[in-house]
């Protein structure tokens, strides 16, 4: 029988074998330099020619967002709010201990090695300026009336390590200024904006601080070939036009303040560094470039690329036509610098769309406590209890209990404690062959196979479900996996406390299973199912031919499992595709086996 514990053991053992092999290859294969990433017309290239960026974002490592910290229900949305809460609850010393551990273990060389082994060629670390310099509110006023810039070595040391790991892996690192001084967006969770303090757009001192930081970074990394460039401002969402009704920046028509600051940043960086790509972004979470061309964007810097972000919309040509047109019109490369947070079907469709149109991409994020990322974090119960205790009217946990809870949460993010998601990895590696499928496990006759281990691949090829992605533009309404368990496909998966099962089945849905080698002969199919609502009819297909219809019983309980046996049928070839089609009813499907007679 399929067991969750067996799955974790198999996956973690496989993961360790991959890393051992990959580490060996790193040392025995000769290192080579691909040279600086750079812009040539509409393409990003290196010394080997055109280069498609296939990147992963580090997410919560250096800037904690409320949804990934799972603290928004307690009114804690930003990095600084979370840290202030810990300072108040456990004291500065233990809070610092937590962050030291978090930064050291959340993203490590093992994480980076794994990304390389899984097909990525770049990493996009989300930076918070506070690891590199002090907020303007804490700086000293100099004799000339300007603020000093106090540099914090911690952030630079972390980047030095990351650059070293990337060099060893022959991967590029693209610095992403995710949290700029003062915060660059009203969406405070992303940028750590505090509405009680001046934002980046309301303070010249914050702008000067950001410019000084990029100068410092350019000075330090100007000769680093494995630094893939500078993503200078992430996801601005602000009324930079100064008109009412443009709060998130999506309706701004000129965006002059955003353009002017990126121009100043570019000019400051170019004083020191002409080798690295500068990635610029529009307003409205990166996609509103209105006014930029009027401000002489075309040709203003020959080593600059345009970025855009893509979330929760349809993956068709029309969804990216605007940015393809801009690429051609301005003769500049484009990069989809952040997308994700969807289903595997959406991932595969997006990657296919990007790569067919010569667009590099970066996925967000590498890990968190949800299904739709490569590394799945299992949240400790005492952390859930802590967040609940922070809600208004609830009794807070003690300092000791709080410290233990957050430290356990930090430990849960270590890659060795995460669950690897092969389905997400497969989806992101599909590229322009997104119709491909692959067996989830090696399947044999006479063994029980969990229904949840259907083939890897897209909806319509490995399975079919009535809802398999979120393309509505609303991040909260479309739930592709109703049970929110195990895999990130459209298939709805539940958990009975011991085993995962396919549930919430609807007529017309189906699942595929690949058998690479079966003996010719007589077989029957045994199915373990349950239903507390209605009898269910399923069809069995082998290599496209319908063999039999099976009636599954009403078991008077969602987790009351019963076994049903089919009639005998003949299998006359080795390579077999088994398809299970739901004709009617809504059974829960636990496991099956092809039993040779």
Image (tube, rainbow, N blue to C red):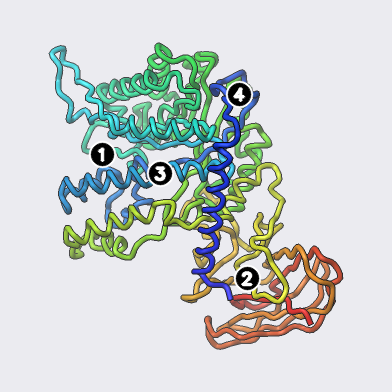
Q: CA distance from mark 4 to mark 1?
A: 39 Å
Distance in Å between CA atoms under marks 3 and 2 = 34 Å
Q: CA distance from mark 1 to mark 2?
A: 48 Å
497 up-or-down from 139: above or below? below
Left or right placement of residue 541 versus residue 195 in this view = right
Point out the frontmost of discs 4 and 1: 4
Image point (34%, 45%), residue name = 64
Instruction: Say which quarter of the image contains residue 548.
Output: bottom right
Left/right of residue 420 with respect to residue 398 in the rendered view: right
Which mark's residue is nearer the viewer, 3 or 2? 3
Asked if residue 263 lies left or right of residue 84, the reply is right
Above or below residue 512? Residue 62 is above
Q: Which residue is mark 2?
A: 451
Q: Position of residue 426 (x, y in %)?
A: 61, 51
Q: Which residue is mark 1?
A: 194
Q: Is residue 335 visible?
A: yes
Residue that mark 4 sits on:
45
**Badge 3 is on which residue?**
107
Which residue shows up at 53% across the image and 38% down it? 55
Q: Secondary structure at mark 4?
A: strand
Q: Which mark is residue 347?
A: none
Name the N-terminal-most of marks 3 and 4.
4
Q: Earlier in the sequence, mark 4 or mark 1?
A: 4
């Amino acid at each position: 029988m399929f067991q969750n514990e067996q799955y974790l053991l198999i996956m973690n053992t496989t993961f360790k074998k991959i890393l051992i092999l990959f580490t060996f290859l790193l040392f025995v294969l000769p290192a080579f330099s691909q040279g600086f990433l750079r812009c040539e017309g509409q393409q990003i290239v290196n010394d080997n020619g055109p280069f498609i960026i296939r990147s992963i974002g580090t997410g919560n490592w250096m800037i904690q967002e409320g949804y990934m910290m799972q603290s928004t229900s307690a009114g804690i949305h930003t990095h600084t709010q979370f840290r202030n809460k810990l300072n108040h609850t456990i004291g500065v010393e233990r809070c610092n201990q937590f962050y030291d551990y978090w930064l050291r273990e959340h993203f490590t060389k093992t994480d980076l090695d794994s990304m390389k082994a899984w097909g990525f060629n770049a990493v996009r670390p989300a930076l918070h300026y506070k690891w590199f310099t002090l907020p303007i509110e804490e700086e000293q006023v100099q004799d000339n009336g300007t603020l000093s810039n106090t540099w914090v070595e911690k952030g630079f040391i972390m980047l030095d390590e990351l650059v070293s790991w990337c060099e060893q892996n022959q991967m590029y690192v693209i610095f992403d200024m995710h949290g700029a001084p003062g915060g660059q967006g009203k969406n405070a969770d992303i940028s750590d904006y505090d509405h009680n303090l001046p934002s980046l757009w309301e303070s010249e001192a914050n702008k000067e601080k950001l410019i000084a930081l990029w100068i410092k970074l350019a000075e330090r990394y100007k000769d680093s070939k494995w630094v893939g460039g500078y993503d200078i401002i992430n996801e601005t969402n602000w009324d930079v036009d100064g008109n009412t009704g443009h709060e998130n920046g999506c309706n701004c028509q000129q965006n002059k303040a955003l353009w002017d600051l990126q121009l100043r940043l570019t000019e400051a960086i170019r004083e020191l560094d002409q080798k690295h790509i500068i990635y610029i972004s529009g307003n409205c979470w990166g996609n509103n470039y209105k006014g930029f061309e009027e401000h002489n964007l075309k040709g203003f810097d020959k080593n600059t690329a345009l970025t855009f972000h893509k979330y929760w919309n349809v993956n068709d040509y029309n969804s990216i036509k605007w940015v393809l047109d801009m690429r051609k019109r301005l003769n500049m490369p484009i990069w989809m610098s952040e997308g994700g947070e969807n289903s595997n079907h959406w991932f595969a469709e997006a990657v296919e769309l990007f790569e067919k149109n010569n667009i590099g991409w970066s996925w967000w994020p590498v890990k968190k406590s949800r299904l739709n990322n490569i590394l799945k974090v299992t949240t400790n119960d005492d952390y859930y209890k802590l967040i609940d205790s922070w809600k208004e009217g609830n009794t807070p946990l003690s300092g000791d209990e709080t410290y233990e809870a957050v430290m356990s949460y930090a430990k849960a993010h270590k890659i060795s404690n995460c669950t690897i998601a092969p389905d997400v990895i497969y989806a992101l590696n599909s590229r322009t062959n997104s119709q491909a499928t692959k067996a989830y496990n090696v399947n044999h006759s006479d063994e029980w196979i969990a229904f949840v281990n259907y083939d890897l691949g897209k909806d319509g090829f490995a399975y079919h479900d009535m809802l398999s992605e979120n393309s509505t533009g609303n991040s909260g309404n479309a739930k592709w996996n109703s049970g929110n368990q195990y895999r990130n496909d459209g298939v709805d998966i539940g958990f009975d406390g011991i085993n995962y099962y396919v549930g919430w089945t609807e007529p017309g849905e189906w699942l595929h299973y690949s058998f690479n080698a079966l003996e010719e002969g007589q077989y029957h199919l045994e199915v373990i199912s349950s239903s507390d609502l209605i009898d269910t009819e399923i069809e069995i297909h082998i290599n496209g031919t319908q063999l039999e219809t099976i009636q599954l019983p009403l078991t008077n309980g969602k987790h009351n499992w019963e076994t049903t046996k089919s009639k005998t049928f003949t299998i006359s070839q080795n390579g077999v595709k088994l398809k299970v089609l739901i004709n009617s009813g809504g059974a829960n499907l636990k496991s099956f086996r092809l039993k040779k007679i």
